[in-house]
Structure formats: C-alpha cells, structure tokens
Amino acid sequence: MSGSVSSKKTSSCCLPLFSSPIGRKWIVALTGILLILFVIAHLLGNLSIFLGPEAINAYAAKLQDLGALLWVARIGLLLAVFLHIWFTISLWRENLAARPQKYAVKNDLQTTVYARLMRLSGLVVLAFVLFHLAEFTWQAFTPEYKTWVDEQGRHDVYRMVIAGFSSPFVTGFYLLAIGLLAMHLSHGIASLFQTLGITTATMRPLFEKGGRAIAWIIFAGYVSIPLAVFFGILRYPAAACSLCR
Ligand code: HEM
C-alpha cells in the first residue's frame, strides 16, 4: 500500500501526526479552519469601508497598534498557509502513487466540479494573495500609497482601496480570484467536517449546503467592495485623488 510506503519514508524524521495520511488530512483541515476564520475576520474588517473613511482608517490603525501581537498572528497565518499547501501536495502525490488501487466506490464529495478544481482554485487564490499583499500591504505597485494619510495622520486605507479598485484589470482579477476562493471554500468546508469525522450520512447534505452557503456569503461580502467602487457607491473626491475614478 502506498500509505505504508510513505509512512516509512517520513516516520523516522517526523511526529506520528505527519507520517500518517489521516494525520496529514487533519493538518490540512485544521489549517483550513484557521484560514477560513482569517478570511471571515478580514471580511468583517473590510466591510467597515461602507461606514466611511473614518471607520476603516481607524480599524486599520488599531490593527497596526497591535504591534508584536500582529506579527504573531501574521507568522501563524503564514505557517498555516505553508502547512496547508505542503500537506495537500503530499496527500495528492500519495493519491497519484496509489492510482491503480483507487477505491472502487467514489465519495460523493470528491466528484463535484468544485472538488476537481480544488488544486487550481487554491493556486489562483495563492497567486491572488501574493498580488494583494504587494498591492495593499507592501504598496509595491504604487509607492505613493505610503504617503497617503487622513486628517488624523493615519494611513488613508479608504483612499488606497478606492484607488486600487479604480483599475478595471485589478477589479476583474479580484472578482475572478474571490470567485475561485468561494469555490475552494464551497468544497473545503464540507470536506473538513468529513476529515474531522463529524459528518454522518444524515448530516452530510447539511454540511454540503451549509459549506456552500458560507462560501457564497463570503463571496458576496468581498465582491461588494470592488463593485461598490465600480458603480460609484464608494468614492473619493476625484479632485483630491488623481488615481481614484
Ligand atoms: C475586496 C476584497 C479585499 C479588500 C478590499 C482587502 C483589503 C485589504 C487591505 C486594505 C489590506 C492592508 C491592510 C493594511 O496594511 O492596513 C489587506 C491585507 C491583507 N489581505 Fe486583504 N482585502 C480583500 C480581500 C482579501 C482576501 C480574499 C484575502 C485572502 C484570501 C485577503 C488576504 C489579506 C492578507 C493575508 C493581508 C495581509 C494582512 C497583514 O499582514 O496585515 N484579502 N487587505
């Protein structure tokens, strides 16, 4: 069996959790839960943009004020992303090696379009996060953003977001990536309940529908921001911001 072959390869160096396929699935599921919690928390923070510049700039300044704690959270998040990807690849390679002995009965969860797109959607979301960090956190594409402060001297995140989504290409990429994120979560949420052994035959449809509902609520929340900029609901006085539409 390929599982026992790979167990032999890793058990000498690693904890039992890392060496068994079930242990690795648990790591993917638990890191997945952490990432989903981040996505929800980040969305709630971002939605404060609808309350105006004061709300989102104050929220961003409070986050920065967390100092060392913010760095602990960032490192934890980075570690979760790394483990999530590393063990997904490890399980995928194991499945490929075991192909000739594939299970005769396929699990329903594994046959949906979303399930087949898990690796592709995960990759696009990863590329998106790197682009997103470069755009808003490192401000690498528009160094001017670093100089934007509001009347209270805080970083003007409101203006930066409006300027960012004033580009139709950036907005288009966000819509695509957030759509793929929703597809990823749609399958991922139901799948993680199954991995953790919480799913029963009667509960499965509930977890599948619930997972899909959560994923598409997250989608609606995130896309509401670029769309609100696109349709002029969120705006910045054009005279004061040459990069804003
Ligand atoms: C409309 C959609 C989004 C908006 C408007 C938005 C906005 C922002 C802003 C303004 C920052 C920089 C905060 C600061 O440094 O003051 C940020 C950081 C970040 N965003 Fe987003 N975001 C969006 C979607 C997403 C999504 C879908 C993800 C993940 C899949 C994500 C992941 C992150 C991460 C990891 C950071 C860095 C956090 C840190 O280290 O401080 N964002 N986002």
Image (cartoon, rainbow, N blue to C red):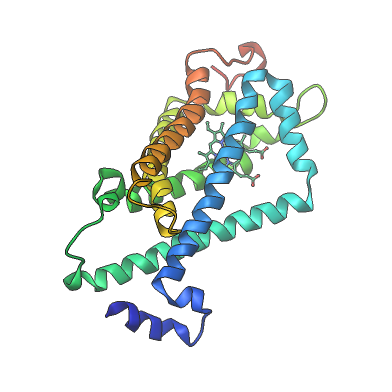
Q: Quadrant of residue 66?
A: top right
- Observer-nearest residue: 101 or 171? 101
Tell me if residue 133 can be seen.
no
Query: Between 82 and 205, which is closer to the camera in this rendering?
Result: 205
List x then y, in percent, for residue 193: 43, 52
Q: Residue at x 48, y 59 (%)?
A: 84
Q: Quadrant of ligand 1?
A: top right
Residue 162 vertical placement versus 104 (above, below): above
Q: Position of residue 160 (x, y in %)?
A: 62, 28
Is residue 32 shown above or below 174? below
Q: Position of residue 216 (x, y in %)?
A: 42, 32
Viewer-proximal residue, 14 or 226? 14
Where 54 sits versus 86, above or below?
above
Quadrant of residue 76 within the rendered picture: bottom right
Query: Which residue does the image show at 42% across and 75% down from the upper left?
Result: 20
The extreme right residue here reads 152
Q: Quadrant of residue 47?
A: top right
